[in-house]
Image (spheres, rainbow, N blue to C red):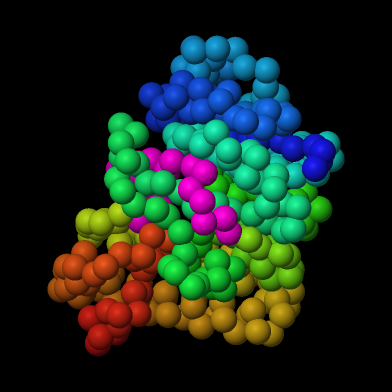
Amino acid sequence: MSDRLALYTTVYRAATPYLREWYDSVAAQTDRDFDLWIGVDGMTCDAVCVALGAAPAARWVIGEPGDSPARLRTRAIQRMLPHYDALLFVDCDDLLDPTRVAGARAALRTSDVAACALKIVDASGRDCGITFAPPTGQDAAALLPRYNVFGLSNTAYRTAVLARCLPVPRDAVLMDWLLATRAWVLGARLAFDPIPRMRYRQYEANIARVVQPFGHAHILAAAERVVAHYRLVLSEPAALPATHRRALCQARARAERFQRAVQSSRATLDRYVTALNALTPAYVWWWCVAHPQLEDVWSN
């Protein structure tokens, strides 16, 4: 397949310690037939090159004053769309397996949106012995009303589909989940590769924590972000097919009930956090919110 492919990341100051290792993993790809695009949030290009240890042959999209992360990424996507058949997203604090690009290219032969499993590592890059992926037997797309496995570190999009998922509101925090949900609603072919082709760094700065233990602040922040996600997804309900709208409305109502419960009662939050950390975890984003096995803890 000779489709034109772009690999995109956004760099920012807090990720500076990880940039050189990230860039080395980009340079080590077995499939080098792609253009590198870098969005720059709150840094200069010179500072980025110093952190990378090189001046990459990249296209740069510079953040503007007042840009939100979603706005910067949206502008970058809009610049790339006319020139490529597919866009591959990675996070600059993660690491690419040498087959990351090749795997995405192969998956996009038969799908419109293709994600891959992630090997979870700690802040220093040490393997935690955990793989991020849907539970065995679960369809990745079917999880989307409640959870997400299509992140902006492990997912590639056909541009014909991605263009239909825009624009993204500037206040979207969970842009990855919003894009994937819109693609699902549109009837796109979503695929998940169970081979880990990224190493996903878990540390305190992660927006979407998946590894225990969870603290009170993690749960309250996660609930707020998930509820805000549903607000954006359902902002145009007339555009949603009935079955999709029903599933998303049910998920939103559940998340809102959960948020009210843990916000209004410290005792409920205490019990929930203790019980959640005792469960066998699921390694998907947002599994910690309104866990179905703990409904008796937070719904009473």
Among the 4 quarters of the image, the one containing residue 283: bottom left
Location of residue 99 with respect to 184 vertically, above or below: above
| Above or below for 88 versus 166 | above
Residue 202 belongs to the span the image colors magenta: yes
Considering the image in quadrants, where does the C terminus appear?
bottom left
Based on the displayed image, in which of its 4 quarters is residue 205 positioned?
A: top left
Residue drawn at x 55%, y 52% as measured from the top left: 116
Task: Classify residue 33 as left or right of residue 220.
Answer: right
Expressed as whole percent of the image width and height from the top left, the position of residue 152 reads 56, 47
Q: Position of residue 224 (x, y in %)?
A: 40, 62
Left or right of residue 43, residue 113 in this image: right
Q: Residue at x 35, y 74 (%)?
A: 290
Q: Is residue 40 above or below residue 252?
A: above
* Count of numbered circles on the image: 0
Instruction: List the single residue furthest toward the right.
Output: 82
Q: Which residues are magenta?
A: 192-210
- Who is closer to the viewer here, 298 or 203? 203
Residue 68 is one of the magenta-drawn residues: no
Would residue 224 be found to the left or right of residue 198 on screen?
left
- Image coordinates of residue 71 in percent, x first then y, are 63, 43
Q: Is 155 above or below relative to 142?
A: above
118 relative to 235 in the view: left or right: left
Mark yes or no: residue 130 visible.
yes
**Quarter in which the N terminus is drawn:** top right
Q: Which residue is found at the position 58% from the left and 23% from the top?
A: 27
Indicate the quadrant where residue 142 lies.
bottom right
Report the residue at 69% width, 48% height from top: 106
Residue placed most toward the observer, 254 or 156: 156
Residue 39 can be seen, yes or no: no
Residue 113, position as x, y percentages in the image: 68, 56
